[in-house]
Image (cartoon, rainbow, N blue to C red):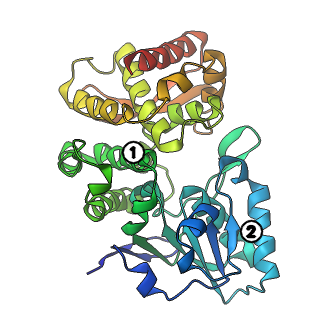
Amino acid sequence: MLKKFEILSSELSYEVFIGSDFVASHLSSFSNKCIVDQKVSTLWGQLFEPGCILFEANEQNKTFAGVEKIISELRERGVARANRISAIGGGIVQDVSTLSASTYMRGIKWEYYPTTLLGMVDSCIGGKSSINVGEFKNLAGNFYPPEKVIIDTSFCRTLEEVQIIEGLFEALKICYADSQGTFQKYLSLINLKTSLYDLDFIALVELSLLTKKRFIEEDEFDQGIRLLLNFGHTFGHAIEAATHFKVKHGVAVGLGILIAHNLSVVLGLIDESNQTAMKLIDHVKQLLVLVPELKTILSCVDPVVYINKFSADKKHTMDNYMAILFRSDGQLIRHSFDKSQKIDQLIVGSFMRMLESL
């Protein structure tokens, strides 16, 4: 039986369905009004008719040029305002599809089928799009929720192990930002002594999304409590950019959590021995150990490049850095600190301590 719940939104309330091995029977085939991750099309070709818009999902295509290409393809296929399009893929496909659907003929209905665990546990709800502009990651975007989100966890069977780890980092971020009780529920679903492919993906996705639902329904447009879900991201985005995206997004979030903890300790916001935070940090390190060649990639990062990428993040103000850090009880706060050479040195130092701890 499918899990089902509703996300309330001022723009458009929409339903979320979670299950396994049901997409093929739920939809006999996708029409030519769909945008499909090129890799997903190769792995799950039986689902798709010829004529789908194939999109190469990488950071270089998560741009206005990528959106323009999709809009042109929709026009060539005769898609009208009364039609609905389907987006099938991970977070990058979601980002470009959201922006394309919201701007094509001033807005067209769409639905989303996430195919990565990261997309399933996090980005599929909330209605946000983010695309890269020049050297700046996620600089442009908007809010435009889908009509429905259909999650078939059987797509996880064809993911690489590191893609599962990426999803776990986003899920633990959401659960930890909510409460210790929710984070403990997350931990109860994770057994790293067995294959990651044996995880109860349905239970994990349901826990993560129902938790995120509370954040986005209270703060739909990222003005208050939802900002806590940027935990690990400000530091992580800089890692992605500084490694030319050799470190993938979810893994970068995990690394960003370690940097946030190191910086929180240095700034005196939390004691290094705080057990609430250490439970999280220990789990993050256990996951990072499973990522191949990670330390080799990170060791090539130029600290000057890293701090330059960090300082360019869109969440900062003119005079202050903004980041989600730890408070004294181990929970999270949105912290503002002056832009200065001293702070830059502390951030670089926190990056270096993260690297040494791996």
Q: Please name the amino acid that badge 2 sits on.
A: Ile
Task: Give coordinates of residue 49: x percent, y percent.
Answer: 63, 83
Quadrant in which residue 350 is drawn: top left
Which secondary structure, mark 1? helix
Task: Give coordinates of residue 222: x percent, y percent.
Answer: 49, 52
Q: In this view, does 312 lie above or below 176?
A: above
Please name the residue that numbered disc 1 is placed on: 165
Q: Quadrant of the N terminus?
A: bottom left
Q: Please name the amino acid that badge 1 sits on.
A: Ile
Quadrant in which residue 154 is drawn: bottom left
Task: Give coordinates of residue 174: x percent, y percent.
Answer: 35, 48
Closest to the observer, 72 or 292: 292
Please name the residue that numbered disc 2 is placed on: 70
Using the rendered image of the protein, determine whether residue 144 is visible from the camera's viewpoint.
Answer: no
Q: Which residue does the image show at 66% across and 34% down from the upper left?
A: 244
Q: Residues within 10 Å of mark 2 (few under 14, many from 20)?
A: many
Q: In this view, does 124 lie to the left or right of 153?
A: right
Closest to the observer, 308 or 303: 303
